Amino acid sequence: MAWTSDVQTGVESGFPVGAENDEIEAVCLTSEVRIEDKKGRLVLVCVHLSLKISNRRENMAAVEILYWQEIPSQIRVKEGDEKVNMELDHRMQERIDEVATERGIVGSDEYIEAWHWEGPEERPGSAQEVADALKKELEDKFLSDS
């Protein structure tokens, strides 16, 4: 909490400074300070601060991505009770098939064993928002030269 006080005029100002994702609400903290001026007169300065910091967080969605080796194929996102499963563009599977053919592992156990889920990783937003954004991000990254 940062605050300033002008003893001569009795003007007080303050502004709360919270950590990221904190919400400032209201709790009272009151303190009194007794000060004498140079002439020996008592000056009473009251400082009253009202704030409450709660740990309200943005919605955070848990993301998992299904890869074949280094190429993504599907995403699954969960936030609260909302779940979204999404396949990436069909060109991703075409890319997987091309790479598997180039590497000579089509139809083999090695091909099957190359599928794996990665995550979960948290991202801010609802499950649908995160899934839509991630789908675009992955397709832009992996299909940009197609």
Image (cartoon, grey):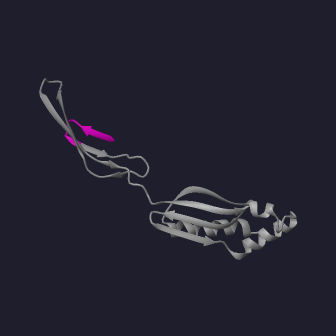
Give the side of residue 30 with respect to residue 106, left or right: left
Q: Position of residue 93 (x, y in %)?
A: 74, 72
Q: Residue 71 lies in what quarter of the image?
A: bottom right
Q: Is residue 110 magenta?
A: no
Give the side of residue 103 with respect to residue 23, left or right: right
In the image, residue 33 above or below residue 139: above
Which quadrant of the rendered structure holds the C terminus? Answer: bottom right
Front residue of 38 and 142: 142
Q: Residue at x 64, y 66 (%)?
A: 137
Q: Is residue 6 magenta?
A: yes
Front residue of 60 and 45: 60
Front residue of 62 and 40: 62
Q: Position of residue 57 (x, y in %)?
A: 42, 55
Number of numbered discs visible in the structure rendering: 0
| Start-end of magenta stretch | 1-11
Q: Position of residue 99 (x, y in %)?
A: 82, 66
Q: Position of residue 136 (x, y in %)?
A: 63, 69
Give the side of residue 22 with respect to residue 7, left or right: right
In the image, residue 98 above or below residue 14: below
Which quadrant of the rendered structure holds the N terminus? Answer: top left
